[in-house]
Image (spheres, rainbow, N blue to C red):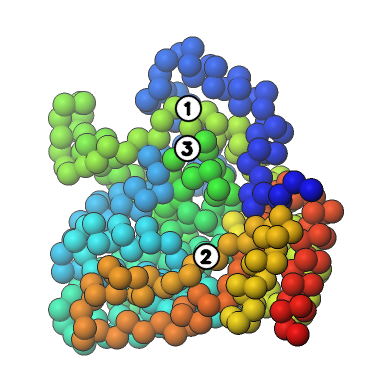
Amino acid sequence: MDPTPFIDLKAQFLALRPQIEKALVNVAAATQFIGGPEVGQLEKALAAFVGGGEVIGCANGTDALTLPLLAWEVGPGDAVFCPSFTFVATAEVVALRGATPIFVDVDPQTYNLSPEDLERKIQLVFKKGRLKPKVVIPVDLFGLPADFPAIKAIAKKFDILVLEDAAQGFGGEIFGQKAGLLADAGATSFFPAKPLGCYGDGGAVLVRDPHLAEVIRSSRSHGQGSSKYEHVRLGVNSRLDTLQAAILLEKLSVFPNELEARQKVAQGYNELLSDQIIKPVVPEGYYSAWAQYTVRVPAQLRSGLIQYLKEAGVPANIYYPLGLHQQPYYKQLAGKDFDASCPETEKAALEVLSLPMHPYLSDETLARISSLVNQGLELGAK
């Protein structure tokens, strides 16, 4: 039997092949590879999908996080709060601006930033007096939006901006409001493995404030002013190219159906996996984009289970094996006198395991994976 793909991009391509091939040929024939009409069309379509605001395409998800920080003039002396249990880009953009990432622990059920620990860490920063609390970057981990109602209330209390990292969460919702527009600004990624992915790198910033949108559009093109050779602010080169926009327009047309299919896959796992496994939690009123289906298993059984699945042709990945506060470079940034403890992050890093998740996962394959996971745990526990 052929190995099971962790994310089946080929199946998605085959389902959309005629439309995508036509879109690519159209771009090639027009030769507007940068700034072609498809970029603006995509930005408008994405804004319509999330229900308003303005969308600014850019080169990748990391730049999508960088651009709002640049617009907000985040820099040395500023503290930016982000969850420790996430991919490094969330902290990387902070350090690259010269600011200090302050790592916040996560909720043990959702793996998203803990509002309680956020408030504790903000108060600690104020107490130390070395840094100015400026921004918090909650991550919509594994496709589930963070607890923005609680986080925004804390941010308002301390006059802090909120930047939503929706790289994994695009398509998710809280009480009907789409991810990406849940904060002062939002950033998403179109990396191929994301719920809405292109065929290379791509990203977007989502905002409600027209002035902020104008600044970010300028910043993504070298700080451009009224003409190509007028530069009114510090900027970068971060444009979403036309080929990727054309691909994303076709993929966006089926994205709602794919989100529904992801819900069915997640529900299937929930029903088929044994009670030995701690399954993902989606709070009431929340809707996950299911970028990953991540369970928890006993730490002492995880490596054996991964090997058992691998021998059966089923991939299982660990997101993430270390908290950012444990990474060699980042653990020293806040200084030795700062409490960077994140115990829930450290525990989760030892127990989480992500199983194959994509909209084209068949019922038969889903049942096989679930059965293998159950069997592997039973064998390991003996």
Which mark is first along the chain, 3 or 2? 3
Element class at badge 2: loop
Provide the residue designation for mark 2.
319
From the top left corner, tell me how far across and down residue 297 is, in percent.
Answer: 64, 77
Are the residues tagged 1 and 3 within 8 Å (C-beta)? yes
From the top left corner, tell me how far across and down residue 145 is, in percent.
Answer: 54, 64
Badge 2 amino acid: Tyr
From the top left corner, tell me how far across and down residue 25 is, in percent.
Answer: 55, 17
Characterize the local packing of mark 2: few (<14), some (14-19) or many (20 or more) Cα atoms within 10 angstroms: many
Q: Name the residue nearer the viewer: 150 or 307.
A: 307
Q: Name the residue nearer the viewer: 306 or 346.
A: 306
Q: Name the residue nearer the viewer: 374 or 21.
A: 374
Quarter of the C terminus within the rendering? bottom right
Q: Is residue 267 above or below residue 2?
A: below
Provide the residue designation for mark 3.
200
Which residue of the protein is positioned furthest toward the front in this rendering?
311
Element class at badge 3: loop
Residue in the picture at 60% in, 19% down: 22
> What is the quadrant of residue 173 in the picture?
bottom right
Q: CA distance from mark 2 to mark 3?
A: 21 Å
Q: Is residue 140 above or below residue 17?
A: below
Characterize the local packing of mark 1: few (<14), some (14-19) or many (20 or more) Cα atoms within 10 angstroms: many
Which mark is first along the chain, 2 or 1? 1
Are the residues tagged 2 and 3 within 8 Å (C-beta)? no
> What is the quadrant of residue 255 in the picture?
top right
